[in-house]
Image (cartoon, grey):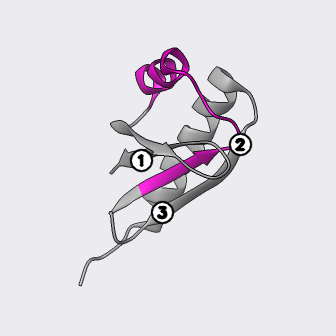
Amino acid sequence: MNNIDFDTIWRQQDEIRTVVNAVLGECIWNLAYSERRMAIELELTTHLDEDAVSDLNSQSPLPCDYDGEGTRGTKFVFWL
C-alpha cells in the first residue's frame, strides 16, 4: 500500500493553480489527485490551441503532459 503525502500534493496543486492563473487566467474546471495514475489531473474551462498548450507546459512546476480534450476543456496530467 502506498503512503500518500497529501501535504506535498496540496502544495503542488497550489503551484499548478498559480501557474495556470498567471499564464491563462482563472480557467480551472477541475484540479485533483488521481491515486490510480499517481498524478495530479487538470481540466480547464477552455479548449487551448497548440501554442497555449506549449506555453503552459513550459511554465509548469512539474513534468506534465497534454491529456486530451475533456467535456469542459483541455486536460493535463502532472506527474509527481
Image position of 6 with respect to 64: above or below: below
Q: Which residues are magenta?
A: 40-60
Question: Which image quadrant for residue 46?
Answer: top right
Question: Which image quadrant for residue 65?
Answer: top left
- The residue that appears at 76% across and 35% down in the rendered structure is 26
Judging from the image, what secondary structure is the residue with disc 1 in? strand
Which tag, 2 or 1, sits closer to the chain's start?
2
In the picture as drawn, the residue positioned furthest to the left comes out as 1
**Residue highlighted by disc 1:** 77
**The N terminus is located in which quarter?**
bottom left
In the rendered view, does 2 fall on the left or right side of 48? Answer: left
Estimate the x, y position of residue 2 in percent, counting from the top left: 26, 77
The alpha-carbon separation of the residues under discs 2 and 3 comes to 18 Å
Judging from the image, what secondary structure is the residue with disc 3 in? strand
Estimate the x, y position of residue 64 in percent, counting from the top left: 37, 38
**Residue highlighted by disc 3:** 33
Judging from the image, what secondary structure is the residue with disc 2 in? loop
Does residue 34 belong to the magenta stretch?
no
Instruction: Residue type at mark 2: give it.
Output: Thr
**Residue highlighted by disc 2:** 45
- The residue that appears at 73% across and 38% down in the rendered structure is 27
- The residue that appears at 74% across and 27% down in the rendered structure is 25
Q: Give the numbered dot on residue 23.
A: none
Instruction: Residue type at mark 1: give it.
Output: Val
Instruction: Residue type at mark 3: give it.
Output: Tyr
Q: Nearer the viewer, mark 2 or mark 3?
A: 2
Estimate the x, y position of residue 56 in percent, counting from the top left: 51, 25
The alpha-carbon separation of the residues under discs 2 and 1 comes to 15 Å
